[in-house]
Image: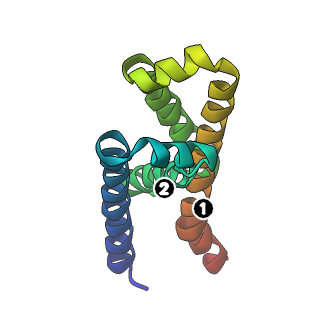
Amino acid sequence: MSLIKERNQEKLFVVVALVMLVAWEVFVKFFASIPILHLIVTFQLDKFFHVIGGAFLAGVFLLLSRNLQLLQTLLLVLVFAVFFEVLEFLFDGEVIDFFYNRPDLWVGDLVGDIIAGLAGAVLYWKATLGRKKVTQA
């Protein structure tokens, strides 16, 4: 596959992932009923979107620099994931309530969110750069 076609597919993925993430946030914040939110929390359905978020971040970083190794990509995703979680903790009232009411569950959810994001980054990296390194060897 040509480099231009690969780059266009990667850009398309980043755009589609961003649209999915924004749509999820809008749905959860403005349209999801209490029973739906309970279902999301009970089955941790948000982890799917954390995987997409990690893949999105990896996609952005790899579009900016094709020379990133897997560990560098993971470190960048980790930094941004922690930054986002801090912002969420500081400015999202529901997250603050969750922390004060159930700090044990909040810590577990936080760790799970970050692990899911890192998993998404690994999947994206393997699907793009990891595959290319194997075929070039």
Residue at the location (60% across, 73% down)? 131
Q: Amino acid at mark 2?
A: Ile
- Residue 109 image position (x, y, % from top left): 63, 34
In the picture shown, does residue 68 fall above or below 89?
below
Q: Amino acid at mark 1?
A: Leu
| Element on which disc 2 rests | helix
- Residue 94 image position (x, y, % from top left): 44, 25
Label 1 crowd bin: few (<14), some (14–19), many (20+), radius 10 Å: some
Residue at the location (36% across, 70% down)? 7
Q: Quadrant of residue 113?
A: top right
For this orientation, the residue located farthest to the bottom is 1
| Element on which disc 1 rests | helix
Quadrant for the N terminus, please.
Answer: bottom left
- Label 1, label 2: how many angstroms apart (C-alpha)? 10 Å
- Residue 86 image position (x, y, % from top left): 47, 22
Lower sequence index among marks 1 and 2: 2
The numbered disc on residue 58 is: none
Residue at the location (39% across, 45% down)? 33
Q: In this orientation, which residue lies closer to the viewer: 105 or 49?
A: 105
122 left or right of 35 in image? right
Is residue 73 visible from the viewing direction of this image?
A: no
- Residue 98 image position (x, y, % from top left): 54, 23
In the picture shown, does residue 58 fall above or below 103?
below
Label 2 crowd bin: few (<14), some (14–19), many (20+), radius 10 Å: many
Quadrant for the C terminus, please.
Answer: bottom right
The numbered disc on residue 52 is: 2
Residue picked out by circle 1: 123
> How many tags in the picture?
2
